[in-house]
Image (tube, rainbow, N blue to C red):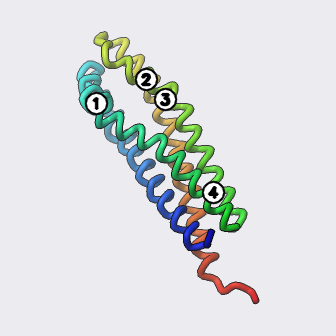
Amino acid sequence: MSCKRALSFIAVATAFEGLRAGIGLLRLVLDLPARGLLGASAYADFFRATDLTSRGFALYLTYGFGGAVMTALAYAAARRAGLPTAARRLIATSVVASIAILVMTTQAVPLGLSVRTETNPVALNQIFNRFELWTVLRLCCGIASFLCMITALTIVATSATRPQPQ
């Protein structure tokens, strides 16, 4: 595989990871703090109207599995093209972070789904406290993944523009 083609895979994966980190940051900065203003019951209604809809499921499936697939494809492309070791290691770290997000999601999803039927505000607060923990951990992995990908992209892009020794 050519360096340019591998660079394209890395650029697309980096863009995806940037979107994924941005969505997670939006949740952390805007959505989760709204619970304190709205109260657990009203926030649960919001959560049901957004996250627990078919659109929410589609977004989060794409968000979770897409990151793992995109970073894995970028790693495979980087390896086949023989890109610099530092870039390959960063992309591999991004793959691990993406897999960690999926693993942590196995803990967050049951909590989110339990909001469908729970109406007790005290129980809802307990659920959302635990859900928030898993969200913060997943966001940390998402940001780490994006930073690894953007750094790898920079390494590959700058090494591709340098004159090659003869």
Q: Callout 2: 10 Å neighbours few (<14), some, many (20+)? A: some
Q: Which mark is residue 129?
A: 2
Q: Give the residue type that dot 2 points to.
A: Asn
Is residue 64 depicted above or below 129 in this figure?
below
Instruction: Please report whichever mark, 2 or 4, sits nearer to the chain's N-terminal start.
Output: 4
Q: Are the residues tagged 1 and 2 within 8 Å (C-beta)?
A: no
Q: Give the residue type that dot 3 points to.
A: Leu
Relative depth, front residue between 36 and 93: 93
Q: Callout 1: 10 Å neighbours few (<14), some, many (20+)? A: few
CA separation, marks 1 and 2?
21 Å
Q: Callout 4: 10 Å neighbours few (<14), some, many (20+)? A: some
Name the residue at 28% across, 30% down.
53
Q: Would you name the residue on which mark 4 appears?
A: 76
Q: Are the residues tagged 2 and 4 within 8 Å (C-beta)?
A: no
Q: Give the x, y percent position of residue 144.
A: 56, 49
CA separation, marks 3 and 2?
6 Å
Instruction: Please report whichever mark, 1 or 2, sits nearer to the chain's N-terminal start.
Output: 1
Q: Would you name the residue on which mark 3 appears?
A: 133
Q: Give the x, y percent position of residue 126.
A: 41, 17
